[in-house]
Image: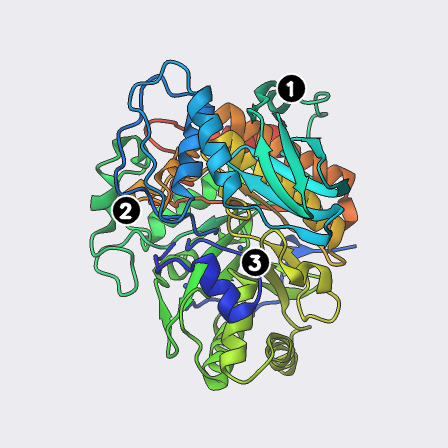
Amino acid sequence: MKQYPPLTMLTLMTFLGACAMFSACGGGGGDDAEPTAQTQIASSEAVSPAPVLPTDPPLPETASEDFLAARAAAESINGATAPIATEVTSDAPIYAALTAKVAATQETSTTTSPQSCTIDQTRYFAGSCWANVKDTIPSGSNRTYSNARLNHTGSVNANCIGGKVSWSTGLCRSNAAGVQSPAEPLPTPDSSSYKIGTFYFPGWRDNQPGAPAKLPWERIKAYPEREPMLGWYDDGSVAVVEQQLKWMRSYGIDYVVFDWYWNGKGTELGHSVDAYLKTETKRDVPFALLWANHSAVPRTKLEFTSMVDFWISQYFNKPEYLKIDGKPVIYLFSHIYFANQASKMGQTFTALLTEAEERARQAGHKGIYFVAGTHIDSSIVKKAAGSGYSAFSSYNYHGRADDVSISFEELDNAYQYVWNWVVAESSIPYIIPMSQGWDKRPWGGSPNPLHDLSGGVQTGFERHLTEARRLMDANPSKTMKMGVICCWNEFGEGSILEPTKKDGFGYLEKVKKVFGAP
């Protein structure tokens, strides 16, 4: 996705009073025919990791997962410059010491009286230790709680002295077997039962205003394992997009969502959706737009309504445009950004969504099916009724709260946690977001470089998709058995479903295996 300066947690809380976080991550032509049955679907936020330590030694070859988690913890301590050994034979003592140091920075809790401590908190320690505690502890006592992190072992200890809690942790580590061993095999999928999409980043044409680089492929060539099977292509080429659509259709991708950018007067990076609209096979893979609203635009209500009118006139009448309940679908990258943009206009986000839907109705549509990008603990999830949104989803997740993943397994765990939370808390549908991985090194790397160890692993990806399908099967009404995968071609962020010369069709084969294909 186009790169913008990351918002820190402090910035978000200052402007929005929230703890939902995201990481930064199309005109057309054609016939104005009625939507086909194939495009109809009937329904029944990146954390900002802390800066790296100024004295950042190379990772030891023998470092274990716990050592890496400990190092991430050290990096999360503002102003910390704790040395980390470059030769490690047993990392447990270092991990425990850093855990204690992190805990020492988090000694606040609710004080009810000098005689006891009342705790009602979710806390995160040193990457792998989580606490989810509701308890009252007498002063002078301590309690031990099991690690609340999914598929992890270990414990968290709370000690009450004079009505104030201090925290410490045991050695928390991943229980990988718990992730790798599904409860039971899934039956052979019926592809007609699921609707699986993918996000498409239109960033692979040279010299484009708004692109992440003047010559974007030059950044990727330093990572030759990412070279597409199509070579270093131009994603504004009709022939390229035609081939990509054929692959999508063959491997069970039912729709494509183009990242879409608006500068206040027109589109940027619109060449890929333009090419899509010129293909012969576009009706086989319907399309929608993800409004990438992580910029300052729109600044005024006029800029917003002009953008909505552009959607209506240029896209919504296309027979290939994806619809749910008869409404054209628009994904929003971030609800929290949109709420902030609306506030700066002197508007509420609900008022703007309502006006957008009315403009669509006046043009002959049933409204707009807005899908809000959210993250764990986003307050909007519990306040969905009357918000103006029709469903929730996300472009990508990076972890829980301020705890970013440092492996694909941890990334998968974080996704599963958020999936279950949103399904439980939301009163509107949830289009299950899935991820092929995260490794942003070509774009300069993540603020916490260990997060870039979250790149895709084919066996882990299959498990990830399998758990998403289980959730859909268990919650068909809430999920509509519909999902979206990030991403088809985020080569700079390391989220790549598209066939590459290294991995071939491996990741698409996993999609086909789990969800089926025509």
Residue 212 versus residue 188: which sits nearer the camera? 212
Give whichever of discs 3 and 2 has the lower sequence position: 3
The location of residue 11, given as percent across then percent down, is: 45, 64
Identify which amino acid the numbered label 1 is placed on. Answer: Ser
Q: Are marks 3 and 1 in contact (CB under 8 Å)?
A: no
Real-space CA distance between mark 2 and mark 1, rounded to the nearest whole angstrom: 35 Å
Quarter that holds the C terminus? top right
| Residue drawn at x 53%, y 55% as measured from the top left | 45
| Residue drawn at x 74%, y 71% as measured from the top left | 386
Identify which amino acid the numbered label 2 is placed on. Answer: Gly
Crowding around mark 3 (Cα neighbors within 10 Å: few <14, some 14 to 19, many 20+) is many
Per the image, label 3 sits on a secondary structure element best described as: loop
Which mark lies nearer to you, 3 or 1?
A: 3
Mark sitting on residue 461: none
Mark sitting on residue 181: 1
Quarter that holds the N terminus? bottom left
Please name the residue that numbered disc 2 is placed on: 444
Please name the residue that numbered disc 3 is placed on: 19
Per the image, label 1 sits on a secondary structure element best described as: loop
Crowding around mark 2 (Cα neighbors within 10 Å: few <14, some 14 to 19, many 20+) is few
- Picture layout, residue 507 above or below residue 318: above
Per the image, label 2 sits on a secondary structure element best described as: loop
Residue 151 versus residue 37: which sits nearer the camera? 151
Q: How is the image coloured?
A: rainbow
Crowding around mark 1 (Cα neighbors within 10 Å: few <14, some 14 to 19, many 20+) is few
Real-space CA distance between mark 3 and mark 1, rounded to the nearest whole angstrom: 33 Å
Give whichever of discs 2 and 1 has the lower sequence position: 1
Identify which amino acid the numbered label 3 is placed on. Answer: Cys
